[in-house]
Amino acid sequence: MDKVFKALADPGRRLLLDRLYADNGQTLGQLCEHLEMTRQAVTKHLKLLEEASLVVTIWRGREKLHYLNPVPIHEIAERWIGKFERARLRVLAELKTQLEGEADG
C-alpha cells in the first residue's frame, strides 16, 4: 500500500490516472499529448504507477496500451475511508431511530 500512496502523491501521476480514467487503454504517445511533460518523464511516472499496480499494460501487436486498475484505490477507500464512513452512518441511523421514536411517543 505504501507504493500506492507514493504513486498518488505526485500530481503528474494523478494527472495520468485521470487521463486513463477519461479514456482507458492509451499508448504512451496518446498519454503524452497535451501534457507539459517529456516522454521520458511520462515513462518514469508510468513505471511507478505500474509498480503500484495502479496501471496495467497490455500489448496489442506492437502497441503497448496502458489501463487504469482501480483495485488499489478501492482497497485504500475500504481501509482508510470506509471504516470512518460506517461509524458515521451508524450514528445517523441511531439518530433517525431516536427521532422516529420521539415522533411516535
Image (cartoon, helix red, strand yellow):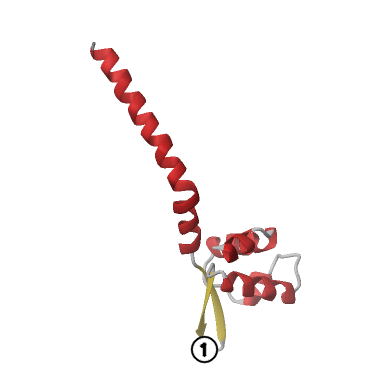
Residue extending farthest bottom = 61
- Residue 60 is left or right of residue 31, and the answer is left
* Tally of numbered discs: 1
65 vs 96: above or below: below
Q: Residue 59's spot in the image, x, y percent?
A: 51, 84
- Image quarter (top left, top right, bottom left or bottom right) of the C terminus: top left
As shown in the figure, which amino acid type bears the numbered disc 1?
Gly
Task: Looking at the picture, tell me which residue is in the foreground, 29 or 47.
Answer: 47
Residue extending farthest top = 105
Task: Looking at the picture, tell me which residue is in the foreground, 64 or 6.
Answer: 6
- Image quarter (top left, top right, bottom left or bottom right) of the N terminus: bottom right
Q: Residue 94's spot in the image, x, y percent?
A: 33, 27
Residue 78 visible here: yes
- Residue 94 is left or right of residue 27, and the answer is left
Q: Residue 99's spot in the image, x, y percent?
A: 32, 18
Q: Residue at x 43, y 35 (%)?
A: 88
Residue 70 visible here: no
Q: Quadrant of residue 49?
A: bottom right
For disc 1, the marked residue is 61
65 vs 68: above or below: below
- Residue 53 is left or right of residue 99, and the answer is right
Q: Residue 74's spot in the image, x, y percent?
A: 46, 57
Q: Secondary structure at mark 1?
A: loop
Q: Quadrant of residue 33?
A: bottom right
Task: Looking at the picture, tell me which residue is in the foreground, 24 or 48.
Answer: 48
Q: Residue at x 52, y 72 (%)?
A: 25
Mark 1 nearby-residue class (10 Å; few <14, some 14–19, many ≥20):
few
Q: Residue at x 63, y 71 (%)?
A: 48
Task: Looking at the picture, tell me which residue is in the foreground, 93 or 22.
Answer: 93
Q: Quadrant of residue 15?
A: bottom right
- Residue 23 is left or right of residue 42, and the answer is left
